[in-house]
Image (cartoon, helix red, strand yellow):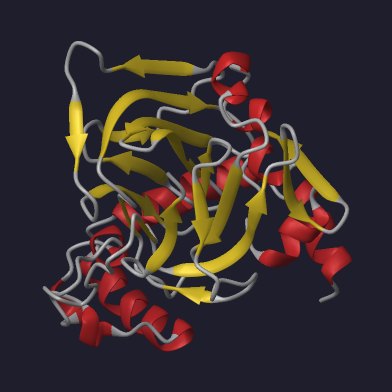
Amino acid sequence: MSDRLAVLLQYLLPKKALTAFAGGCAASRATGWTHRVIPWFIRRYGVNMAEAANPDPRSYATFNDFFTRALRPGARPLASADWVCPVDGAISQFGPIEKDQIFQAKGHHYSTRALVGGDAALAALFDDGHFATIYLSPRDYHRIHMPCDARLTRMIYVPGDLFSVNPVTARGVPGLFARNERVVCVFHTPHGPFVQVLVGATIVGSMATTWHGVVNPPRTPDVREWRYAEAPVDLKQGDEMGRFLLGSTVVLLWPKDTLQFNPAWAPAGAVRMGEPMAQATA
């Protein structure tokens, strides 16, 4: 199938209905189905079960339990870095934000304001800052961790579409990451404000955070927001902060003059949670 046809199908398919159906299947406790699909998935995508805290595919009650499996202790040691990679995946893009424009792929940019759900004041904090976009493929570990010590200040659910977020779609759908459903997590860190965005996609049944639980569903048509000034949520570097129930993408935002990326980073490069991502500049 050509890339153009693959993108065209993204527009034509009933993505929300497919996602609801996939979410129901992934949560099903139909043991026979689960015991067939999990081994198939492991073979199809080359999942490394030796890293799992529980390596027995038949022991998982649901596909979601398998997909969000924990890793064995020591599988992801934390590097000595101010910012460590929050997920396993592949670097989609990273680098400077040009005023308020984030680079998605050749010929495509989107704004920080669109990404965070229209909050101009929040977006302005990241003018001329830096961003990183990391894609989680089906074979990857799908828990999301903290790149540094931080205090949660806000969480924003932004409704949107459910395009696939694979590299082909990123090259073909304008403003992809600011069009899809997403959960924007706003933090204060020793180095200033920081945002980590969980981006939904086709068949991503839901996204969850450790302090809230499942954020979606429900899939409401309006932006929803939670503030945490009265009930602070403090997280340490490496702590789990969320998970995808089926795969997707994270986008990270930093203010101007905050960090320098790991010089070994490159677009399409594979990364693992806990590896060095960046050092603070001040």
181 or 211: nearer the eye? 211
Q: Split into 4 quadrants, where in the image is the C terminus?
A: top left
Q: Residue 2: percent from the left, percent from the top?
A: 85, 74
88 or 280: nearer the eye? 280
- Location of residue 263 with respect to 238 vertically, above or below: below
39 or 32: nearer the eye? 39
Extreme residue toward the top, this view: 230
Asked whether the viewer can see residue 117, the reply is no
Which residue is at 46% across, 54% downward?
22
Q: Residue 68: percent from the left, percent from the top?
A: 28, 61
Asked whether the viewer can see residue 263, the reply is yes
Q: Relative to 171, is 73 on the left or the right?
A: left
Q: Split into 4 quadrants, where in the image is the N terminus?
A: bottom right
Q: Residue 196: percent from the left, percent from the top?
A: 44, 41
Which residue is at 40% across, 43% downward?
206
Image quadrant assignment for residue 194: top left
Q: Relative to 21, is 17 on the left or the right?
A: right
Which residue is at 53% across, 41% downward?
253
- Location of residue 186 with respect to 202 vertically, above or below: above
- Location of residue 145 with respect to 53 vertically, above or below: above
Q: Residue 137: percent from the left, percent from the top?
A: 50, 69
Total number of numbered labels?
A: 0
